[in-house]
Structure formats: structure tokens, C-alpha cells
Image (tube, grey):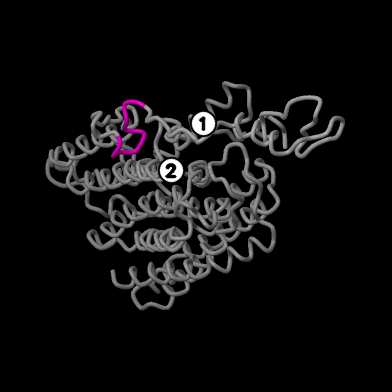
Amino acid sequence: MREYLLTLCVTAAVTYLLTGPVRKFAIATGAMPEIRARDVHREPTPRLGGIAMFGGLCAGLLVADHLAGLSSVFELSNEPRALLSGAGLIWLIGVLDDKFEIDALIKLGGQMIAAGVMVVQGLTILWLPIPGIGTVSLTQWQGTLLTVALVVITINAVNFVDGLDGLAGGMVCIAAAAFFMYSYRIWYGYGIEAAAPATLFAAILMGMCLGFLPHNMHPARIFMGDSGSMLIGLVLAAAAISVTGQVDPDAMGIFVGGERAATQAMLPVFIPLLLPLTIIAIPMADLVLAIVRRTWKGQSPFAADRGHLHHRLLEIGHSHSRAVLIMYFWSALLSFGTVAYSVNSASMWIVLLIVALSAVGLVLLLLPRFTPRAPRWAESFVPPRYRRRVMPQPALPYEEEDVDEVAEERVPVAAGVSGVNGATAIGPRSRFHDRRKAGSAR
């Protein structure tokens, strides 16, 4: 555990220290796109934060390779090298997209190629535990297609949710923490060495997100861009594939006792199928809803809009920070709830706790609909949104028209001579001192 924590801290430190220079580099190279209609930020913000996150990934793998307890992961498995190869390719595609805005189909092809590179080097799904059937071995083509599909779906789910400051990084960090607890339990509790790579990937992923979040929280000083969102999505998918397809379910000793005991003991085996889905449940729901919404309108599934879940939270009335925290809450509830249920599925307290927290989450979600109102005697002491009526504004010493009359009296204008700010002796001065108040395009 100490070596995992050391790897996490080194990854976070390198990512944090690199983000500042990367921000200056992004500004110098012009990687600051104009504000689009779907964006929620008001000022152009540099991208390319994925460069710092990729540096943290490389530093984490390098440190782990030189630690006594984790060096065996690189000796017994080729998965870390497969992850680095796929991550390097997807990172390069993301950097090009952050700078030059490449086509969505080209990015999709690059994601499939990156997944294929990992499959060729051994990071693939070999078998699946199917409830009621048992362990089913997959052919090479079946494993390849399933691996590529899982990688592409996870990458795009994380990319879709990257719409608010700190949202994608925080949600992936929460998911990585839950996955680390699960995979570490398999490795340490069951003594299965095949779960060590997934545990290492989860620790490094947490370090990447924790090191970048201080620069990315609202108001963000830099965005991770596609180079960062696709990168952390690929690392998350790699961890899920490593546990799901590489750990032999029979090695966990699931066939024990009677039928009920065997069913409860098999839950940790089925969790690799459920945990990746619960981790990306919210981004996946956002992805599916976006595809259905855009297809229904006759648009391309890759066309950008302002209909994502985080946009809807802002429309309901939540602030930027509260919307991000609500998404954090639901992500943590699904991820850690699934892990807790896999540890002790016979405990009814876990189910009741999850139900109670879900009710709390619904109340927080609908909070703007039930805005409390202060009594009338206290309206002058609370913010305007809690008042029953709008407080009258103090009247100015004189109205705008009075200003015009005073100005005309003090500055007489000869007939036929143009005055200041467009005033003439032929007609009265315009009421609008600024053309923008009259709806001018200036």
C-alpha cells in the first residue's frame, strides 16, 4: 500500500507542477479557442492540460517500475507497456484536436486504433463471468471487439461529461478511488497477482486527476481538453479491462458451501462487469441521451449542444459549483455503493444507506424548486433570491431626461451646427447616451 501511495503522490506532484508551464505554452501557441455557444465560461481559457496529465502518467509508471513491490508488475505482465502505448497515441490525437479541431470521425478512428494497440500487446478481455452460466472463454475476435467497444465507449463518455470546471477530473478521480479499493481487495485479499496492474492503473489515474484539479476547479485557469479527457477515459477503461478479462474467476474460490453461500461469494466475480458500468453510469446516461436527442432532431450524434446533464443542472437554477458537487455526489454513491455491496452483500444496512443517500441526492437535485422565503421583517437582511418581493431601489437625484434638459440649458447649440454626441439644434437629444442601449450592434 505504501508503494501505491508513493506512486499516487509522485503522479499528482508531477501533474501539478507541469500544469503551470503547460498553461503558458498553450497561451503562447494559441491553444485558446473562442467561446462557443455551448460553453459556460466567459473568458477564453487555454487547453492542452492533457500534456501535464500525460507527464504524470509517465512519471507514475517510471516510479512504479523502480519500486521493489511493484516492479514485478512490469516483469510478469505486459499490460503497463500496452497502456503506455495506447495512452501515447490517444494523447497525441487529443493534442492535435485541442489545437486544430480535427474531425469527430478521425478522432473515433484514432480511439479504435489506440484500443487495438493495447489489444495487440495483451491488454484484452479473455473471458467473462456470466451469471447462471459461469466463466465463458472468448475467442480472439470476440475479445478484441469487446475490448475496443469498451475503450471507445468509456473515452467518449468521459469526454461528453467534460463540460464544467473540474467535473470530468473529479468524477474520474472518484471512480478511480472506488476501483482502486476493489482491485486492491482482490489482489491483497484473494492473493491474485493478476489484479496488481489494475490496482496500479487506478492509483496513477487518481494521481493524474488530483494533480490537475487545483488548476481546473471553478474558475478554471486551464482546461484538460480532449488530450486530457480521452487520456483519463482510456486509463479508466484499461483498469476495468485488466480486472474483467485477466483475473480468473475460479481462482477466487467461488464454489463454497450451499447455493446461497455460492451466490454471495460469486458477487465479487460479477462486480468487474458491474463496476465499470456504475463508474461511468452518469457519463454513459449523458452519452445515450445526447445521441437520442441529436438523432431525434435530425442532427449528427457528434454535433455539440447545451443539452447535457450539467447544462440542465445550470438551467434548473444550480450554481456552477453546486452542479459539479451534485455530479460528484451521484458518482460517489454509485461507485462506492457497488464496492460496499460487493464486500458484504448480505447486509441490509448497506442497501438502506444507499437508498437514504439517494433520497438526499434527489432533494439536493430539486433544491432550486423549493427556494425558502424569508419573513417580511427579515427581507432587508437576506439576499434578493430569498425575498418575497423586490426591494425598491433608491431614486436618483434626477432622471435621465432631467440630465438632458440641464445639459441643453448649460450648452446652447447654434442652429445648423452639430453638437456633442450627435445632438443637433433641429431635433432633441437622443435619450440613449450609449448606442448599445438602443440595440445597436456596436
Percent position of residue 278, x then y = 35, 41
Seen from the viewer's position, the closer of residues 282 and 108 is: 282
Question: For mark 2, what is the residue?
Answer: 320
**CA neighbours of label 2 inside 10 A, class few (<14), some (14 to 19), many (20+):** some
Q: Amino acid at mark 1?
A: Gly
Measuring from the top left, give residue 144's x and y in whole percent.
Answer: 52, 46
Q: Quadrant of the C terminus?
A: top right
Which residue occupies 30% across, 43% down? 270
Please tell me how crowded label 1 is: few (under 14), some (14-19), or many (20+) other residues with Cα within 10 Å: some
Discs 1, 2 touching: Cβ within 8 Å: no
Image: 148 above or below 58: above
- The image shows a total of numbered marks equal to 2
User: Residue 410's spot in the image, x, y percent?
Assistant: 69, 38
Q: Residue at x 14, y 42 (%)?
A: 261
* Mark sitting on residue 53: none
Circle 1 residue: 307
Image vertical order of residue 215 relative to residue 145, above or below: below
N-terminal-most mark, 1 or 2: 1
Label 2: state its secondary structure.
helix
* 284 falls in the magenta region: no
Q: Amino acid at mark 2?
A: His
Q: Quadrant of residue 435?
A: top right
Residues in magenta? 380-389
Distance from the alpha carbon under mark 1 to that under mark 2: 16 Å
Q: Residue furthest right?
A: 416
| 20 is higher (above) or lower (below) than 31 | below
Q: Nearer the viewer, residue 395 or 44?
A: 395
Q: Residue at x 16, y 47 (%)?
A: 256
Percent of width and height locating residue 116: 57, 51
For the N terminus, the image quarter is: bottom left
Asked if residue 237 shows in the view, the reply is: no
Q: Of helix, strand and loop, which one carries label 1? A: loop
